[in-house]
């Protein structure tokens, strides 16, 4: 496996992921867990983020401090990515948010684009694409293609559960893009669902089934 895949195995994250996988977990609990896990993931991912020095004044006197160097934009893939973006915004509230709407055609499993609204000058941002599931990799690859067509250079892909098939596709087409995930599951089933996975992330987040 390419070392541009980063598996985050923090015990709190693994605990919450197990609750998310459990089919008896309610919509409300599932949504809260997805938000919490996403925030915890970004805490880990942001360890290596660059800082720049700024001069500030405390109530006592002048000093130098550090703030994040890069402007951050979150791009959730609709629908399921929305809740991940909400969790990350709790930690990085100044992030801008773009949306890419994609759904998988149930027969071909190919992504169909139905919406795209991105922050102005998106090419100047460090962009986190967020989507709970990386299955065949088709949706992730399509979102990356869209951002690359807007000249975005700094992209990271953040997902909860990934399948080896999806990782392979993204790695092969975009080896420069890091993938952050909290689990690499066994495989896809014949319907393109991740096994064991957690089912349909959108349906579980929004209670649509
Ligand atoms: C799910 C998921 C990803 C996609 C992953 O969305 O949230 O976007 O499938 O599958 P892939 O890697 O094979 O492309 P879905 O298409 O079910 O849409 P939804 O979020 O609107 O339910
Ligand atoms: N999309 C989901 O929501 N779940 C899967 O297992 C695969 C794609």
Image (cartoon, helix red, strand yellow):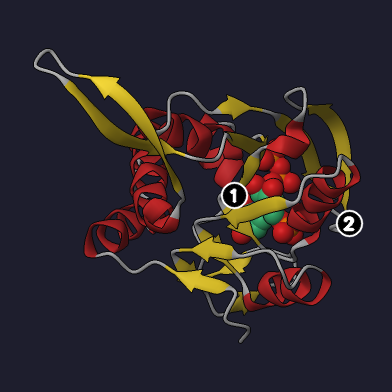
How far is the residue under mark 1 from the one under mark 2?
Answer: 16 Å
Q: Mark 1: give few (<14), some (14-19) or many (20+) Cα within 10 Å.
A: some
Percent x, y of residue 110:
88, 55
Quadrant of the snapshot with the N terminus: bottom right
Q: Mark 2: give few (<14), some (14-19) or many (20+) Cα within 10 Å.
A: few
Q: Nearer the viewer, residue 174 or 165?
A: 174
Query: In screen coordinates, is 30 left or right of 185?
Result: left
Question: What is the secondary structure assignment of the residue under circle 2?
Answer: loop
Percent x, y of residue 61:
14, 19
The residue shown at (57%, 81%) is 3
Q: Among all residues in the image, which is located at the extreme top?
A: 59
Classify residue 57 by image quadrant.
Answer: top left
Residue 108, placed above or below residue 172: above
**Mark number displayed over residue 48:** none
Which of the marked residues, 1 or 2, is nearer the chain's N terminus?
2
Which residue bears the numbered disc 2? 107
Q: Among all residues in the image, which is located at the extreme front?
A: 62
CB contact under 8 Å: marks 1 and 2 = no
Percent x, y of residue 113:
88, 38
The residue shown at (78%, 47%) is 143
Q: Is mark 1 within 8 Å of ligand 2?
A: yes
Viewer can see residue 185: yes
Q: Is mark 2 within 8 Å of ligand 1?
A: no
Quadrant of the snapshot with the C terminus: top right
The residue shown at (44%, 36%) is 88
Percent x, y of residue 198:
49, 57
Residue 110, placed above or below residue 208: below
The residue shown at (75%, 66%) is 136
Residue 207, placed above or below residue 13: above
Question: What is the secondary structure assignment of the residue under circle 1?
Answer: loop
Which residue bears the numbered disc 1? 200
């Amino acid at each position: 496996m390419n070392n541009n895949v980063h598996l985050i195995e923090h015990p709190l994250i693994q605990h919450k992921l197990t609750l998310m996988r459990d089919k008896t977990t309610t919509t409300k609990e599932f949504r809260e867990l997805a938000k919490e896990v996403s925030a915890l993931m970004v805490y880990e991912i942001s360890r290596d983020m660059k800082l720049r020095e700024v001069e500030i004044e405390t109530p006592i006197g002048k000093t130098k401090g550090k703030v994040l160097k890069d402007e951050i934009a979150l791009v959730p893939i609709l629908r399921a990515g929305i809740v991940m973006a909400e969790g990350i915004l709790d930690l990085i509230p100044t992030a801008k948010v773009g949306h890419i709407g994609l759904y998988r055609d149930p027969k071909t499993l190919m992504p169909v684009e139905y919406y795209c609204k991105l922050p102005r000058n998106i090419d100047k941002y460090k962009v986190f694409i967020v989507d709970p599931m990386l299955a065949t990799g088709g949706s992730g690859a399509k979102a990356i293609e869209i951002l690359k067509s807007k000249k975005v250079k700094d992209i990271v892909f953040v997902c909860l559960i990934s399948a080896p098939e999806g990782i392979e596709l993204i790695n092969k087409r975009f080896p420069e893009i890091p993938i952050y995930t909290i689990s690499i599951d066994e495989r896809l089933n014949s319907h393109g669902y991740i096994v064991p996975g957690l089912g349909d992330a959108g349906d579980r987040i929004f209670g649509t089934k």
